[in-house]
Amino acid sequence: MRIDLHCHSTASDGTDTPAELVRNAGAAGLDVVALTDHDTTRGYAEAVAALPSGLTLVTGAELSCRVDGISMHMLAYLFDPEEPALLAERELVRDDRVPRARAMVARLNELGAPVTWEQVARIAGEGSVGRPHVATALVELGVVPTVNDAFTGHWLADGGRAHVAKHETDPFEAIRLVKGAGGVTVFAHPAASKRGRTVPESVIAELAAAGLDGIEVDHMDHDADTRGRLRGLAADLGLLVTGSSDYHGSRKTCVLGEYTTDPEVYGEITRRATGAFPVPGTGGV
Ligand SMILES: [Zn+2]
Ligand SMILES: [Zn+2]
C-alpha cells in the first residue's frame, strides 16, 4: 500500500487542480492520498468528485502556525470541515486584515498616537484595509509627514513598535481546535531548516504532551541524519511517524509518492479520527 499524506492543489499553492491531483495520484499508483492545502478545505468537493477507483482520499489541511516567533506548519487530518471554531480560525489565518489593523491602532494608541479605527476604516473605504491606510491616518494627524515616514521601525515597518505580524495559529491552540473537530495532528517537516528557524525539541515534547499525534519525518527537506534523529525523538515521545511528498505540482521538484507513510501509521490515524472518514474512490468524473 502506497500512502502519501501531504499534497497541495490550486486550492492553495499547488499547480494541479484538486481533480488533476487525485487523477495524477491514481496514475502514480498511490492507494491513499491526502489533500492538505494551506488553511483551506475548499478543494475537497472537486477532489471527491474526481476520485478514481482504487484511490482513497484523506481530507486535511496544513495549518499556518507560529510559536515563540517561529513559523511552523501543522498537518490536520480527517477533521470536520464545518466545525465552527476551527473553521473560524482557518478564515482568520487566510484574512486577518481587519483584526490586524485594529491591533495596530491599539498599539499606536499605547504609543500616544491618537488614531481611531473609524478614521482608518474611512480612509480604507471600499478597499481591504491594510498598513498603508493606518499610515495615512498617521499623516492626517500630523504624527509623521509622509506615508513613507510611517514605514520605519519607529512605527509600522516589519518589527516596528506598532507593527502587528500576520496572524498564525498558536500550535497548542491548533491541536486543541483540530481535536475539537475530531481530527488528528501531525507536525509538518519539523526540522526543515532551509525554511528558517525550526522549533526546538523541547517545544515538540510540549506539543506531544498537549496531544500532538505525530511528526512528519520522511520529507524532502530532511536529510538522513535529521530523519534518524526525528525517528528517535518520535519514539521517545510516543509520536506517530509519517512520510509524504509535500507535492505542489510543477511548483516544486518532488513527485507524488516520493515519500510515503507506513500503512500501520495510516491505520492508527484513521482510528483516532472522528471528524471525517477516508473517502474511497468510485471512478471519478
Ligand atoms: Zn509546509
Ligand atoms: Zn505543504
Image (cartoon, rainbow, N blue to C red):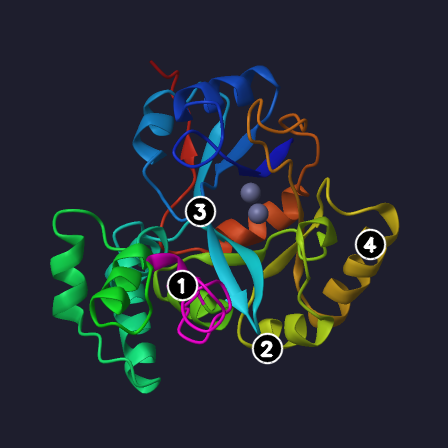
Task: Locate residue 256 relative to residue 77 in the image: left or right.
Answer: right
Residue 164 in magenta? Answer: yes
First in sequence, mark 3 or 2: give its number. Answer: 3
Q: For mark 3, does the 10 Å Cα neighbourhood hold few (<14), some (14 to 19), or many (20 or more) residues?
A: many
Q: Residue at x 48, y 71 (%)?
A: 160
Q: Quadrant of residue 219?
A: top right
The one of 284 and 102 positioned closer to us in this rendering? 102
**Quadrant of residue 284 in the image?**
top left
Work out whether mark 1 precedes mark 3 in sequence or the reverse, and give the earlier one.
Answer: 3
Q: Is residue 22 magenta?
A: no
Q: Which residues are magenta?
A: 147-169
Residue under numbered circle 1: 149
Task: From this view, report whether residue 86 is shown above or below residue 94.
Answer: below
Q: Which mark is residue 226?
A: 4
Q: Separation of disc 1 and disc 3 at Cα?
A: 39 Å
Q: Nearer the viewer, mark 1 or mark 3?
A: 1
Name the residue beneath numbered marker 2.
209
Mark 4: give few (<14), some (14-19) or many (20+) Cα within 10 Å: some
Distance from Cα at disc 4 to Cα at disc 3: 24 Å
Q: Name the residue type under label 3.
A: Ala
> SS class of the residue under badge 3?
strand
